[in-house]
Amino acid sequence: MYYQKNKNLIVMVNITLFSQILNKLNRYLFTSIVNDYDGDKHSKGINSWTHLVSMLLLQFARLTSLREVSDGLASISGNLLHLGVMKKCPKKSSLSYININRDSDIFKEYYYKLYDELSVVSEFKKIKFKIKRRIFLLDSTLITLCSTIFPWAHYSKTKGAIKLHTLLDYEGCLPKYVYISDGKMADVTAADLIEIPSKCVVVADRAYESFDLLSSWDKKGVIFVVRIKESTGKISYKERELPNDKNPEILIDEEIILEHEQTRKKYDKKLRRVVVYIPEKDVTIELLTNNFTWTAETISNLYKSRWQIESFFKDLKTHLKIKTFIGTSANAVEIQIWTALTTMLILKYLKAISKHNWCLSNLIAFLRLNLFVKIDLQYWLDTPFKPPGEEIEQIQYNIF
């Protein structure tokens, strides 16, 4: 049943917010991926869409176990049809089985396809640099695990861990590419496996100081801004003019060549070195770039923009189910990570299409409280603190 004040405003609907969110996902696209992977073979009566909905419910409602997922779906049995899932609620044992055996690449590929589809929303693009190239932030985050329960997640003698090596799109603050490895893989090693788009800008920390890597980026037309260690050998080639009083934080701006012969064989071109003082932390950092046209202030601000990827990792770990896992196999862990990333993508999309100035943490918290309320999603996003009863009373008054 719909309660409608005018043609442009629908207040109450007969399906839940969670159902309306799922309706925004491209199910045809998901089905085509499932068919490519033959994902519904040996499905234990749970097709891939039901599996995806179950894992998204885990993330949105922040459930703690497979039993809670199974019982949660059973408790809304009257609304299962609106979710597009099978009439029979999945059992805990069946969810455990398919988490182990259904290929996690299905959920990985769906995230990338959905990213390409939803990230075209214009509100995602809030870039402040006057740079025509796409900007990407490269970093990794560590998720510690118990080595006895997750023996495949190698890290140290006493701890297990996995790493999310992430290439974050600065414009939408969403991962363009993620590579999942055990905790022992070095960031530089993983960087060789990450698909860096040609003719873009990559900003990275000193963990990615590898002149073989920088040379390969340079050959692809990539502009890089990388923090380097102070011990890296370099020879000053040409001093550049400093911005004087406009930006006193810029201490040095010069063109250099690498000092040691072995490193110069890996990268034989000249580079630009910018030394910046960070007053908040009382530290001095050295930045290396292959761009000679941008101002030193732009180079400095590009590196400062790295806080966005740290903020993304913090949001992911704080608000979604990604630090504890409901399955112990590598495949189950990867499925949970990819559905967490898909949930974050959906949340950023909802935030982008809303007229209300949502803080992401508030949106997640309030959505969790109202997940099965039957109210129009767009109306709720735009006016979350306006009780729908006010509209209904006005409608009834107009009718009489």
Image (cartoon, rainbow, N blue to C red):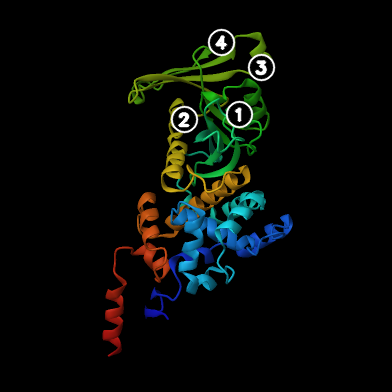
Three-letter amino acid code at the position of disc 4: Gly
Identify the mark nearer the N-term, 4 or 1: 1
Residue type indicated by callout 2: Tyr
Task: Say if residue 268 shows up in the picture.
Answer: yes
User: Which label sits on residue 233?
Assistant: 4
From the viewer's perspective, is the residue at label 4 or at label 3 nearer?
4
Q: Which residue is mark 1?
A: 185
Which residue is under mark 3? Answer: 268
Amino acid beneath label 1: Met
Whole-angstrom CA distance, mark 4 to mark 3, is: 13 Å
The residue tagged 2 is: 303
Residue 264 point in image, percent of width and height: 65, 13
Q: Residues within 10 Å of mark 1 (few under 14, many from 20)?
A: some
The location of residue 79, given as percent across then percent down, is: 49, 72
Residue 20 shows up from this direction: no
Residue at 44% x, 55% y is 352
Alpha-carbon neighbours of circle 4 within 10 Å: few (<14), some, or many (≥20)?
few
Disc 3 to disc 2, C-alpha distance: 24 Å
**Mark closer to the chain start, 4 or 3:** 4
Instruction: Please tell me whether mark 4 sits on a helix, a strand or a loop.
Output: loop
Distance from Cα at disc 4 to Cα at disc 1: 26 Å
- Mark 3 is surrounded, within 10 Å at the Cα level, by few (under 14), some (14 to 19) or many (20 or more) other residues, namely some
Relative to 152, 309 lies left or right: left
Q: Nearer the viewer, residue 355 or 395?
A: 395
Asked if residue 360 is positioned above or below residue 312 in the image, the reply reads below
Q: Quadrant of the N terminus?
A: bottom left
> In the rendered structure, are the residues bearing label 2 and label 1 in contact, judged by CB atoms less than 8 Å apart?
no
Which residue type does callout 3 highlight? Asp
In the image, which is nearer the foreground, mark 4 or mark 1? 1
> What residue do we see at 57% from left, 70% from top?
88
Q: Which corner quadrant holds the C terminus? A: bottom left
Residue located 52% across and 70% down the image = 80
